[in-house]
């Protein structure tokens, strides 16, 4: 069985590589046409997709999935419309391939251009959300990459149906159908194989919980774009504007608690503890948030004392840690120690303080007077995202089509030789 | 002993990480001043450096190094001047850190900037050339990175002396001296340790022969910027200009045969075999090149028949393989099969043919009517290079200071919350 899976994955890898070679020079309108046709194909058989989804839901309930997991899995007409809209939005984005990133002349007479190219083959390993099949497939195609998708076993039938629509889109546009492949097996050996396919996969993007991402990061021999955790901090500086601060902190924590851009720790300038700090904490408590407060904050109404392990922790829930810091340097030191280099926000009207926060921290995203919940490819104008990366190699922050590209140099001479 | 090395490397790694945190916001003039001061320090003690080099040469001769290896190792006053000039050239380049790569506004009111940041800590593992100590140290510092240098045991004393001058430069400019560290041991365990220091090293750059690079690529858990081989092709198209073609082919092969940009295979359009192709091959033979000719070329004077393994082979010598292809698509197919994605050049006056070659191949560098010997950071205007990468992740082609950077997003709001 393991041998069969290994052979299947090798075959998928070879076919992906061959498709990528063709996709690399596919004209932009052809790729966009494939995505539009895929959206149409998806909408043309909503009942079929709902039937497939029902099979997944039955399997999931039998398996005893949590309500949150079931919610991620469910498709209805509105969600299917949203998936199709996503494909069309990616189709409408500018095509990154072939963009001239820089060009210059050299004294030798050479004219040099750096031009965007596809990365090659992307592997996406995800859990229960069936819409990742569409988002990841669309973004990879847009960037001229072939993709091998390995969805969670819970969403197997839904992903298979969405994938079928994407293949119909590829066929309608005359593109190789191996450009978007879905692993047709629930066997976990497929994941292990993908992580080691250095000859056939250029980058792996894991989408899911810490368990999945941690496994991929630890085991992959192929490069990985991912974030393990989003331990986002908000720092309330002495020069914060009270209205902005109260608005942003509550939004950063409570808008949605289950996403990686949700704030997990509030840092309060010492001078504000009994003023704006107390008001912000009261706002959080009033909004139903459990505030786990560090030293110097225990006297505030409604808080619980924080344990040591509450700092540097991703709650993904209506819980936030809070600590007092001396100043922006204290906040920077706290974030360097406990952060996950995902997203941090400073609340201040002082330009020099904001500049110090921006310069001295090295998270993928640093914000001023804005909610960490904006850490998202759509909110960054990328149309969609395949994930958010906290590593520093190649892609960082929200990963859209542009970040799924590489580049090459095109050099024009006139019989030019080197002395 | 292995334990001691492991402990030493961990300590160097921690110190590099701490230095990198400071370097990340070091002002551009301070980094440039450190490089200028390092150049001065180097020139201030030429006799000391020559004495150190003499010790290496004595060790190398005792060890029975080849003449080529000894030549790479030798320092004289001119070479030391060139090393100091290199440092000054890097100092004079624009500082990449803090450059705004893109900025835009979103309908939410957010202003988003993508800003260049240092990568962090770079590890450089190299063989006998002592000048790599200076080039790699200078480029890493320029990009705001700390660097851990592990030179070859043959150049141990020379590298130590050059490193000492760089540390004096750092001190003179008030920068942390751990910004540029040299492994003070010849023990090979240091290399093995570096390859696995994922917490302390962000990227490894190996500089040396195929043995070293292959080992690093196979064993490293840290990302690697490298090329294993430079199997560069030159394709002589039917629409080639005869004068340009003859000039470029001879230069691409013979200017220097030991570098990765030297041409290793000549592909000749079928229609040219007994015309321009024969003349170009005669030029190569006259220049002292051994031409290992494939089918259809055996009748040409002075050639030897090629063996199967002569295609896809890096000769690094006065030897070139030659083959007949039907047209540009035949050349593309040959290069895809046998190339190493380093550098290829097409000789043609036909724009459509050149465009096809540029679009359908995916080498790091593609050239038209120019010698592959231009594949070099200096010739690309980068001041210097730490190496040439053929991978597609992050850096590609000549790796200068700019490619040793990452980026982060800086987001300005005005109390902006997400709906």
Image: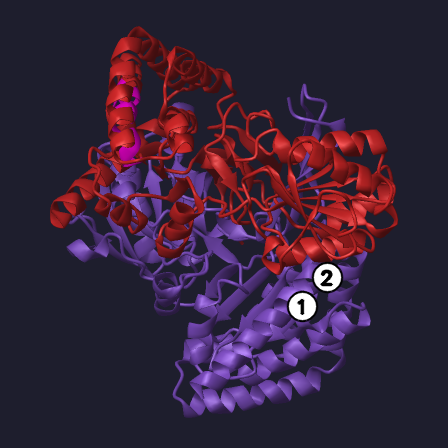
Chain colours: A purple, B red
B155 inside magenta stretch: yes
Q: Main secondary structure of the magenta part?
A: helix
Which of the 4 quarters of the picture holds residue A333? Answer: top left
Q: Secondary structure at mark 1?
A: helix
Residue B251 image offset from top left, x and y in percent: 67, 30
Real-space Cα separation, disc 1 to disc 2, in angstroms: 9 Å
**Residue holding disc 2:** A22
Residue B20 image offset from top left, x and y in percent: 32, 33
Identify the residue at image location x=67%, y=68%: A179
Q: Chain of mark 2?
A: A
Residue A12 image offset from top left, x and y in percent: 59, 74
Q: Which residues are magenta?
A: B152-164
State the quadrant of the C terminus of chain B.
Answer: bottom right
Identify the residue at image location x=45%, y=46%: A393
**Residue holding disc 1:** A179
Q: Which label was assigned to residue A163?
A: none
Q: Is residue A182 above or below residue B188?
A: below
């Amino acid at each position: 069985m393991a041998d069969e899976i290994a052979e299947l994955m090798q075959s998928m890898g070879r076919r992906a590589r061959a498709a990528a070679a063709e996709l690399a020079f596919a004209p932009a309108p052809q790729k966009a046409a494939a995505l539009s046709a895929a959206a149409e194909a998806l909408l043309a058989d909503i009942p079929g997709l709902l039937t497939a989804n029902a099979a997944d839901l039955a399997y999931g309930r039998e398996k005893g999935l949590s309500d949150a997991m079931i919610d991620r899995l469910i498709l209805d007409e509105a969600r299917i419309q949203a998936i199709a809209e996503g494909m069309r939005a990616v189709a409408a984005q500018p095509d990154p391939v072939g963009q001239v990133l820089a060009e210059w002349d050299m004294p030798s007479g050479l004219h040099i251009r750096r031009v965007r190219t596809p990365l090659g083959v992307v592997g996406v390993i995800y859990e229960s959300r069936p819409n990742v099949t569409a988002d990841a497939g669309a973004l990879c195609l847009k960037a001229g990459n072939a993709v091998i998708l390995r969805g969670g076993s819970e969403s197997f039938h839904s992903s298979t149906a969405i994938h079928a629509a994407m293949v119909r889109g590829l066929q309608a546009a005359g593109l190789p159908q191996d450009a978007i492949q879905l692993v047709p097996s629930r066997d976990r050996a497929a994941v292990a194989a993908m992580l080691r396919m250095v000859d056939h996969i250029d980058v792996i993007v894991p989408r899911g919980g810490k368990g999945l991402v941690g496994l991929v990061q630890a085991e992959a021999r192929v490069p990985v774009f991912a974030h393990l955790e989003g331990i986002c901090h908000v720092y309330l500086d002495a020069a914060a504007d009270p209205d902005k601060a109260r608005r942003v902190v509550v939004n950063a924590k409570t808008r949605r608690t289950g996403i990686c851009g949700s704030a997990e720790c509030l840092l309060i300038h010492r001078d504000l503890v009994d003023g704006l700090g107390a008001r912000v904490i009261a706002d959080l408590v009033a909004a139903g948030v459990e505030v786990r407060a560090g030293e110097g904050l225990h006297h505030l109404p409604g808080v619980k004392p924080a344990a040591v392990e509450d700092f540097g922790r991703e709650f993904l829930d209506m819980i936030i840690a809070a600590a007092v810091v001396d100043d922006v340097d204290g906040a920077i030191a706290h974030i360097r120690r406990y952060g996950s280099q995902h997203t941090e926000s400073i609340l201040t009207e002082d330009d020099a303080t904001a500049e110090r926060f921006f310069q001295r921290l090295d998270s993928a995203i640093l914000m001023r007077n804005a909610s960490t919940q904006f850490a998202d490819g759509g909110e960054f104008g990328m149309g969609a995202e395949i994930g958010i990366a906290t590593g520093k190699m190649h892609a960082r922050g929200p990963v859209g089509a542009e970040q799924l590209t590489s580049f090459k140099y095109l050099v024009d001479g006139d019989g030019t030789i080197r002395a």
